């Protein structure tokens, strides 16, 4: 009792209260910049469930086939060089990316995941009073990085879960600095066709930088990630990642491609050693193994169609997806929650997307064939119970 009393006295004196986020009022005397406390923490896909039995993780759009064996070998080869600082210029990796995609290596910048590239863009081009456009179901890092930079996020409505070019163009003001869209988009999986994308690039004022987030480019057969638009417009920038089709999410490697002057700006923000030596070597080996990429793309397309068609058959529609997941639609939020619970009971973890204003949906990563079959079996049982 006595000890409790002392603790309570201490708490009352030094921790006089908490705000709605549970942060002590004392701590608020050290005040962050405006906007920082408006940031909702990024919520990633769950990876564990209670208990020890293995789980099927379909919540983070990871590649079920893993990286190229050559990338794994390159990573292992780095084990005896851990005392050395990595190269700062990323020249070898940029050369390999440039070779594979036919790009100018001087206009490539490599980041600690494409998330870091997104953050640089916001820090470099948007500050207090500036506006950054993202769309209703757009990837959450755009808003987070915008607020971190002190700028104002502007949310533009989509049309049936697709980015709406006209609404974006109408939302531009003299204050607009950046427009972020992912193509294909996450979590909807939908995509703007070439003509619509070109219309967006052409229609934006010259003071606005259009960022085409190409995290899922490789899954969309025949799409160049917006490269041709980057080449023809100084104010179009493309980001790419090694986290998705390359199966290297754990190593954190992304890159951006844009006009020389934009790359020059971003390089001023880049930490000199932002990528580890092992990440650089593994990514280089990965990008040079396009056979593995083609195999992953083909398997993904086959299983994505299988999953889409089987779920449609049992009354769970989804938009045509161009990525490595589908967005399954249920009749309402309660049904989506119940389906999620049913999947978890079978140790399958998918992604709830309430935070993306899609409470009636679940985003399901295309896993192995066995994983897809398990999802279909569980949801078939589940839908029978829905009568
Ligand atoms: C997964 C994803 C990324 C990639 O992030 P990294 O930091 O490169 O792992 C970027 N944009 C979108 C839309 C994504 O879904």
Image (cartoon, rainbow, N blue to C red):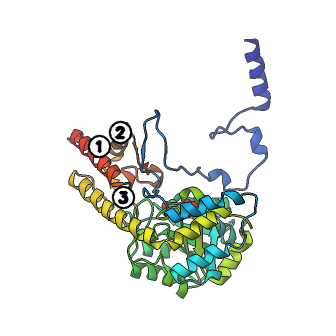
Residue 86, percent from left and from top: 72, 65
Q: Ligand 1: does it lie within 8 Å of the C-beta at label 3?
A: no
Q: Residue at x 42, y 77 (%)?
A: 223
Question: Does residue 320 appear left or right of residue 176 in this picture?
Answer: left
Please tell me whether residue 115 is drawn above or below residue 196 in the rendered image: above
Disc sitting over residue 346 in the figure: 2
Disc 1 to disc 3, C-alpha distance = 16 Å
Element on which disc 2 rests: loop
Please tell me whether residue 161 is drawn above or below residue 256 in the rendered image: above
Q: Residues within 10 Å of mark 1 (few under 14, many from 20)?
A: some
Mark 2 touching mark 1, by CB under 8 A? Answer: yes
- Mark 1 against mark 3, which lies toward the viewer? 1
* Image quadrant containing the C terminus: top left
* Image quadrant containing the N terminus: top right
Question: Does residue 357 appear left or right of residue 9 in this picture?
Answer: left
* Residue in front for this viewpoint, 272 or 169: 272
Disc 3 to disc 2, C-alpha distance = 19 Å
Residue 331: tell me if it is visible.
Answer: no
Disc sitting over residue 378 in the figure: 1
Question: Does residue 75 appear left or right of residue 197 in this picture?
Answer: right
Residue 14, percent from left and from top: 79, 31
Residue 55, percent from left and from top: 42, 42
Badge 3 is on which residue? 326
Quadrant housing residue 303: bottom left
Q: Residues within 10 Å of mark 2 (few under 14, many from 20)?
A: some
């Amino acid at each position: 009792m006595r000890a409790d009393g002392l603790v309570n006295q201490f708490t009352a004196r030094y921790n006089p209260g908490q705000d709605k986020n549970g942060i002590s009022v004392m701590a608020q005397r050290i005040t962050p910049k405006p906007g920082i406390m408006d940031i909702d923490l990024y919520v990633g896909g769950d990876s564990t469930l209670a208990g020890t039995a293995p789980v099927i993780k379909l919540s983070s759009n990871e590649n079920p086939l893993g990286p190229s064996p050559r990338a794994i070998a390159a990573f292992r080869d780095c084990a005896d060089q851990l005392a050395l600082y990595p190269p700062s210029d990323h020249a070898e990796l940029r050369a390999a990316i440039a070779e594979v995609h036919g790009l100018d290596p001087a206009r490539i910048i490599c980041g600690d995941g494409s998330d870091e590239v997104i953050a640089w863009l916001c820090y470099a081009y948007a500050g207090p009073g500036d506006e950054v456009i993202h769309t209703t179901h757009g990837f959450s890092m755009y808003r987070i990085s915008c607020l971190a930079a002190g700028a104002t996020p502007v949310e533009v409505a989509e049309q049936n879960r697709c980015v709406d070019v006209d609404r974006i163009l109408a939302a531009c003001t003299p204050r607009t600095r950046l427009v972020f869209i992912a193509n294909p988009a996450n979590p909807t999986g939908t995509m703007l066709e070439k003509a619509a994308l070109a219309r967006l690039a052409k229609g934006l004022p010259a003071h606005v930088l259009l960022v085409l987030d190409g995290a899922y480019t490789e899954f969309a057969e025949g799409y160049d990630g917006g490269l041709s638009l980057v080449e023809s417009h100084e104010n179009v920038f493309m980001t790419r990642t090694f986290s998705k089709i390359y199966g290297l999410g754990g190593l954190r490697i992304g890159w951006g491609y844009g006009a020389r002057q934009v790359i020059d700006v971003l390089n001023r923000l880049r930490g000199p050693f932002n990528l580890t030596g092992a990440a650089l070597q593994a990514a280089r080996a990965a990008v040079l193994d396009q056979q593995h990429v083609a195999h992953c793309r083909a398997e993904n397309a086959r299983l994505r169609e299988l999953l889409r068609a089987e779920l449609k058959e049992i009354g769970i529609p989804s938009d045509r997806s161009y990525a490595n997941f589908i967005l399954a639609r249920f009749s309402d939020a309660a049904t989506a929650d119940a389906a999620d619970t049913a999947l978890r009971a079978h140790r399958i973890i998918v992604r709830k997307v309430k935070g993306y204003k899609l409470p009636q949906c679940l985003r399901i990563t295309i896993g192995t064939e066995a994983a897809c079959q398990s999802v279909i079996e569980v949801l078939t049982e589940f839908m029978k119970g829905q009568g």
